[in-house]
Image (cartoon, rainbow, N blue to C red):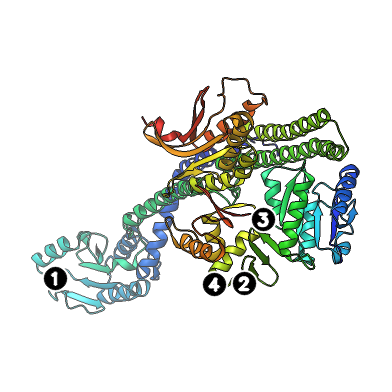
């Protein structure tokens, strides 16, 4: 799978956040009228009686005033009946208004309708008090001299109209600025909420990614995660998945290589051993013939060499596996004495046949080391084999447990000519190399003390030494 | 006396020729196949199968598995040039023994004999002669030749001796014997097995202080040899 990050500007997280900010800025001029309208709408909803009343077409205060003054002026020189008639006519025009007139003598004349608060006889004080009271008050009051001015000496007429029946004038309207603030706050809140959602979404996706990275799947590798939107995090997820796949691929390749190597070695082993077997079979057949003493010796030598060659092939192939790190070790806490005894049991007949006396002094108490059972057997096999091949002349195989440099060591000793001497059988190097490789893998170490009187191999846990 | 019939599957003509003639010389009837296609049919009247791993067509592991599925009691000996421990372990999952090439024909013959003895594949086996004892494995009878009397063993003693006989010539550690006979993990310092061996020796040996039948291999374990 080829992975190429696609940088699309409109898919970027940055773009999205800038977009949110931009919308917020653009909305400021729009937001204010919207909040006005919304505030008004809410006011309408909350105070329906304020707005629900029918507003009568009386006009503004000024219009009413003008109409009243005009009506008064028209009554210049009129009789009381005419004035009464005019008032009744005006009452038709302003049915919600209270009308009355007062003559020059201060007598209250026609009242439409009758009102208790109107004094029947107006004193000067009453008049002044009335005028003071009614300035900018509710009801809206218009007082006009009948006949146009006081010179007519006809008295005055009064119109009282509750202000709620008048057309609302600017400045008079009901308003509540709190709602405006609430709407601004709501819009700001929406912006904050959007930002919060934006970041919490990012956070959630990052956490998911983290979980995906840290939680291993069944094969020990992290599992691929579901890819989300193709923004920065999406690309990160994609990159992560790409990495997981690459890792899986490489793991798979490694396994295949391991299998290939193993099968190659199996085939090699087969191909090398088959001719050896055939060779051995012919030697065996030859042995049935009558041969001279020298011929028999040659045959014996050839048979030994065949078995050496086969052992060497084994070494070579295991060394190949080991040195390439393809030898699977599974370390377990095991009683090594048990493995030693089993291995010695297998080698005992060989020692007997070669006239080697085994001196095995192992304690009853187990010794637990972290070893791979197969690997440890292989170590012992190689050491025992070396003993038979190169130190058989000593006629002695000693296996014991001894203290060594502050730890416990397993010792394998012989009375052979020592490793300094040139062995007639050669080829010990590879076997020991394998021993060392295996021991290192198991955290063990080997020390060898060799002289002409014999060789002693110590095997001990290396970790304890390194602590010193 | 009917001869023992062996099925031998080997693709290499030289090795096949040699092994078959060698085994025939030892008195076995050998059917030699160059590939495993007919192995299951041919194995019907055989007492043992010798199987190579690298074969044309089906490999030895597959054939061995099929044989064991069809005839669970038929002993299978893998004879292979593949020496890796993986191969051995894979083979021993079903096979009764695994011998690597090159091998000595005497070893092959010895292993065949052990397998046949263990499976009862020998029609009328001669009694096993161990020092002064005659052991009739089929009838579970042990005769002391000096007195011509039958030796009667207790259950555990019999199990221990039978286990040693099954691994004739092999040295067995006390852990191996204990775990095979008692079928539970050996505990360090457990003297049970030693006590049983002592009682066993009292019955089997001419001189229990100087045992001949059950040898003690110092530091390792015990062995019974013919």
* Disc 1, SS: loop
Marks 4 and 2, how far apart in space? 16 Å
| Chain that bears disc 3 | B
Residue B14, position as x, y percentages in the image: 90, 42
Query: Residue A85 is drawn in which quadrant?
Result: bottom left
Residue A131, position as x, y percentages in the image: 17, 62
Front residue of A282 and A35: A282
B195 lies above or below A249: below
The mark closer to the camera, 1 or 3, is 3
* Disc 2, SS: strand
The mark closer to the camera, 1 or 2, is 2
Marks 3 and 2, how far apart in space? 20 Å
N-term mark: 4 or 2: 2
**What residue would you read off at disc 2?**
B149
At x 58% / y 68%, what residue is drawn? B158
* Disc 3, SS: loop
**What residue would you read off at disc 3?**
B226
**What residue would you read off at disc 4?**
B154
Quadrant in the picture for the C terminus of chain A? top left
Q: Is residue A425 left or right of residue A163?
A: right
* Disc 4, SS: loop
| Chain that bears disc 4 | B
Q: Is residue A76 left or right of residue B169?
A: left
Determine if residue A55 is in view.
no
The mark closer to the camera, 4 or 1, is 4
Determine if residue A349 is in view.
yes
């Amino acid at each position: 799978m080829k992975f190429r990050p696609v940088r699309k500007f409109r898919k970027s997280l940055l773009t999205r956040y800038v977009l949110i900010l931009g919308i917020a800025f653009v909305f400021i001029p729009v937001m204010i009228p919207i909040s006005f309208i919304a505030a008004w709408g809410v006011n309408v909803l909350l105070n329906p009686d304020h707005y629900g009343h029918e507003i009568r077409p009386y006009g503004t205060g000024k219009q009413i005033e003008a109409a009243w003054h005009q009506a008064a002026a028209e009554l210049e020189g009129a009789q009381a009946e005419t004035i009464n008639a005019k008032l009744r006519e005006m009452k038709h025009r302003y049915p919600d208004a209270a009308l009355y007139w007062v003559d020059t003598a201060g007598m209250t004349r026609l009242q439409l309708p009758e009102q208790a608060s109107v004094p029947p006889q107006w004193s000067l004080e009453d008049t002044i008090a009335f005028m003071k009271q009614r300035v900018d008050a509710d009801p809206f009051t218009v007082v006009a001299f009948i006949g146009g001015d006081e010179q007519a000496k006809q008295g005055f007429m009064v119109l009282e109209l509750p202000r709620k029946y008048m057309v609302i004038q600017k400045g008079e309207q009901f308003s509540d600025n709190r709602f405006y603030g609430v709407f601004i706050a709501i819009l700001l809140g929406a912006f904050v909420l959007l930002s919060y959602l934006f970041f919490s979404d990012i956070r959630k996706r990052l956490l998911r990614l983290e979980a995906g990275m840290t939680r291993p799947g069944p094969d020990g590798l992290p599992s691929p995660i579901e890819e989300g939107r193709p923004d920065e995090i999406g690309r990160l997820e994609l990159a992560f998945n790409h990495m997981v796949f690459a890792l899986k691929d490489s793991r798979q390749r490694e396994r295949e290589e391991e299998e290939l190597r193993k099968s190659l070695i199996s085939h090699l082993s087969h191909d090398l051993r088959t001719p050896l077997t055939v060779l051995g079979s012919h030697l065996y057949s030859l042995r049935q013939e009558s041969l001279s003493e020298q011929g028999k010796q040659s045959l014996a030598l050839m048979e030994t060499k065949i078995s050496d060659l086969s052992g060497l092939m084994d070494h070579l192939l295991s060394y190949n596996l080991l040195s390439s790190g393809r030898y699977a070790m599974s370390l377990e806490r095991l009683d090594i004495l048990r493995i030693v005894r089993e291995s010695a049991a297998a080698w005992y007949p060989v020692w007997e046949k070669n006239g080697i006396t085994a001196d095995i002094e192992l304690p009853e108490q187990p010794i637990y080391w972290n070893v791979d059972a197969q690997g440890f057997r292989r170590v012992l096999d190689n050491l025992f084999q070396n003993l038979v091949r190169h130190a058989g002349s000593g006629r002695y195989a000693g296996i014991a447990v001894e203290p060594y440099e502050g730890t416990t060591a397993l010792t394998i000793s012989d009375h052979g000519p020592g490793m300094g001497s040139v062995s007639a059988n050669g080829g010990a190097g590879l076997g020991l190399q394998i021993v060392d490789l295996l021991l290192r893998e198991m955290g063990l170490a080997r020390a060898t003390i060799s002289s002409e009187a014999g060789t002693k191999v110590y095997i001990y846990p290396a970790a304890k030494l390194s602590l010193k | 006396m009917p001869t023992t019939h062996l099925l031998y599957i080997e693709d290499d003509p030289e090795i096949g020729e040699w092994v078959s003639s060698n085994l025939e010389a030892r008195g076995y009837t050998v059917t030699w196949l160059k590939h495993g296609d007919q192995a299951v049919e041919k194995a019907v009247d055989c007492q043992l199968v010798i199987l190579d791993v690298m074969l044309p067509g089906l490999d030895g592991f597959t054939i061995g598995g099929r044989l064991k599925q069809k005839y669970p009691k038929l002993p299978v000996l893998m004879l292979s040039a593949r020496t890796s421990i993986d191969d051995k372990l894979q083979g021993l999952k079903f096979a009764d023994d695994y011998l690597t090439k090159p091998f000595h024909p005497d070893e092959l013959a010895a292993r065949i004999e052990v397998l046949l003895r263990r499976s009862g594949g020998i029609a009328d086996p001669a009694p096993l002669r161990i020092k002064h004892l005659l052991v009739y494995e089929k009838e579970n009878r042990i005769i002391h030749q000096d007195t011509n009397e039958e030796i009667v063993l207790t259950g555990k003693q019999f199990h221990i001796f039978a286990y040693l006989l099954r691994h004739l010539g092999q040295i067995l550690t006390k852990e191996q014997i204990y775990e095979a006979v008692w079928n539970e993990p050996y505990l360090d310092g457990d003297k049970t097995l030693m006590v049983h061996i002592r009682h066993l020796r009292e019955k089997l040996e001419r001189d229990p202080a100087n045992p001949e039948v059950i040898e003690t291999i110092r530091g390792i374990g015990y062995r019974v040899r013919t």
